[in-house]
Image (cartoon, rainbow, N blue to C red):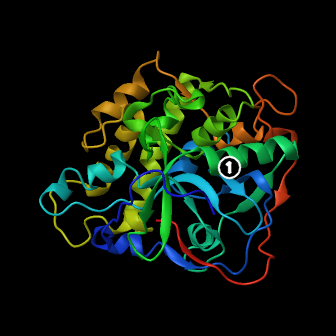
Amino acid sequence: MKPAFVLPLVIVSSCLASAAAAAEQACGYSSAGWNAPNGAAVFSAGSGPIGDVLNAVGEFRTHSMLSHGPGRWVTHATMKQPRENSWPEVCSTPIVSNDLLDGYPGLAQVNQGGIYRFLYGSGGSGPAALTYQVGDPKRAASIGEAIWWEVPYYAERSIIDEGVEIPRLSVRGDRVHYSFFQYRNTEGTPTGGPAWNNGMVCSSFLAYAHYLDGQGAIPPYTYSHAKLASAANALHDGVMDSCENSLGFWGSIGTSIVCLTDVCDKAANQVANCMASHACDTGSSSLWRGVRDDPKTVAVSISPDRIGGWSGHPWGTQAGATVWSADTNHNVQWNSGGNVYGCWY
């Protein structure tokens, strides 16, 4: 285990969890431990809002994680499903805005049971692809060790099961929230600089880890206005379609309340606004459409495919390539002995 706690113990009440969040299977057992080496970048691909955005710009992987070794802990940035607002707020802003603004748990470390439940939920087929890349094993392991030993953390507890510890890393002096806006602009995250609301997403964290260990800065990629517009449309339409077709959390919004407005459209606007301009508290379409329709706007970001060196991003010895990009895909297998219980939030 890591050294003694360097920041105060914080207990988070389990009453904050929603029924929708519980359905995500936050806690459970892994079937075994995975085979990803220490420092490996692990990638998954799946559906959902982030999948809609990345697929719209021609990319495939939707999540990236840092393995600390076979059967060991994992560091990644993610968020649980947001909660639905109560009446009458649900009719104008269907989603609790703070849940989008301060995506929870954000940057955190979970054990094999926790990451297994994150990936496979209640035991479904899981992501469309689950692979890892190492590149230079020595350099990759150095990144894994740097994050494990050198970054301070808050020793928090799962909001579903207080018996499970979930360390939340402290970067830039505070907890790191999952921030949709990082897909629009990573700001100073790749080199440890400031970012709005102290946010990160999975791939900007990997870039930060790469830089922190002295392995080089990963320059963000500039997505053209056309790609930004395509991504904005895909995000809005994906959330709206899921809501209207009663898929997952999005399909439960407003189902027990009669509103005189289109709740699904409002929810989609809220998510799109959050990513386009970090305004997570409005269901109006004017903000995200304004960004989409301004020909001068672009996105400057780092995606999982950029971390892995795919979809035209630098790889191997090319300038701006990551340590991991020199490798091909290896299938993640759950093949170590025994089961491990854990939670991912």
Residue type at mark 1 is: Arg
Image location of residue 15, percent across then percent down: 27, 72
Query: Label 1 belongs to which residue?
Result: 61
Local packing at callout 1 (Cα closer than 10 Å; few below 14, some 14-19, many 20+) is many
Query: Quick one: 71 or 263, which is closer to the camera?
Result: 71
Query: Quick one: 102 or 280, which is closer to the camera?
Result: 102
**Label 1 SS:** loop
Image location of residue 137, percent across then percent down: 86, 47
- Please indicate whether residue 258 sits to the left or right of residue 69 in the image: left
Image location of residue 336, percent across then percent down: 80, 77
How many labels were placed on the picture? 1
- Please indicate whether residue 240 sits to the left or right of residue 338 in the image: left
* The N terminus, quarter of image: bottom right
The answer to whether any part of residue 268 appears in the image is: no
Give the residue displayed 64% in from the left and 34% down from the top. 212
- Please indicate whether residue 239 sits to the left or right of residue 13 in the image: right
Image location of residue 78, percent across then percent down: 51, 54
User: Could you say which quadrant of the image residue 257 lies in?
Assistant: bottom left
Give the residue displayed 43% in from the left and 76% down from the top. 23
Give the residue displayed 71% in from the left and 48% down from the top. 145
Q: Farthest residue in the top direction?
A: 296
User: Could you say which quadrant of the image residue 37 lies in?
Assistant: bottom right
Task: Give the vertical position of 338 relative to 101 (above or below).
Answer: below
Query: Quick one: 244 or 166, which is closer to the camera?
Result: 166
Give the residue displayed 66% in from the left and 74% down from the top. 125
The answer to whether any part of residue 339 appears in the image is: yes
